[in-house]
Image: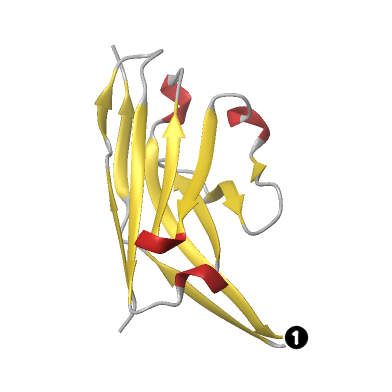
Amino acid sequence: QVHLVESGGGLVQPGGSLRLSCVASELRFINYALNWYRQAPGKERELVARITNIPSDYLDSVKGRFTISRDDAKNTAFLQMNNLKPEDTAIYYCNADLQVSPWRKEDYWGQGTQVTVSS
């Protein structure tokens, strides 16, 4: 059974940094696109960053502050978050997806980790 486990969330002051990690098990990691989503209270889940084998893509509001990376040998994805702002407060979720065929997509989610940016 596939598991994605996030860690690294917490409480940080504005301007601070956090590094989120996502470790996958029972998954051929290298084949999957890796994504970080977030969901703030009362808001819809949004894609923050995505990495495949092409240059990564970011939500406009985090460009220049967040960096997504992956270590396929360790089945781990990372999200380095710098210069955090209160509006970054949300539950952050790791997601792995693979378009298996034009009509089927494999999609796995972690349980989420809370990030709170507050003074």
53 or 19, which is in the foreground?
53
| Color theme of the render | secondary structure
Provide the residue designation for mark 1.
102
Q: Is residue 60 left or right of residue 46?
A: right
In the structure shown, which secondary structural element does the residue marked by tag 1 occupy? loop
Q: Position of residue 51 (x, y in %)?
A: 60, 53
Q: Quadrant of the C terminus?
A: top left
Amino acid carrying mark 1 in the image: Pro
Outermost residue on the right side: it is 102
Position of 10 relative to 84 (above/below): below
30 or 116, which is in the foreground?
30
Q: Quadrant of residue 91?
A: top left
Q: Position of residue 69 (x, y in %)?
A: 50, 46
Q: Quadrant of residue 75?
A: bottom left
Position of 110 relative to 99 (above/below): above
Number of dots carrying numbers:
1
Residue at left 30%, top 84%?
1
Q: Position of residue 95 (x, y in %)?
A: 47, 62
Q: Quadrant of residue 49?
A: top right
52 or 90, which is in the foreground?
52
Q: Position of residue 35 (x, y in %)?
A: 53, 55
Residue at left 31%, top 18%?
118
Residue at left 44%, top 41%?
79
Q: Is residue 72 left or right of residue 47?
A: left
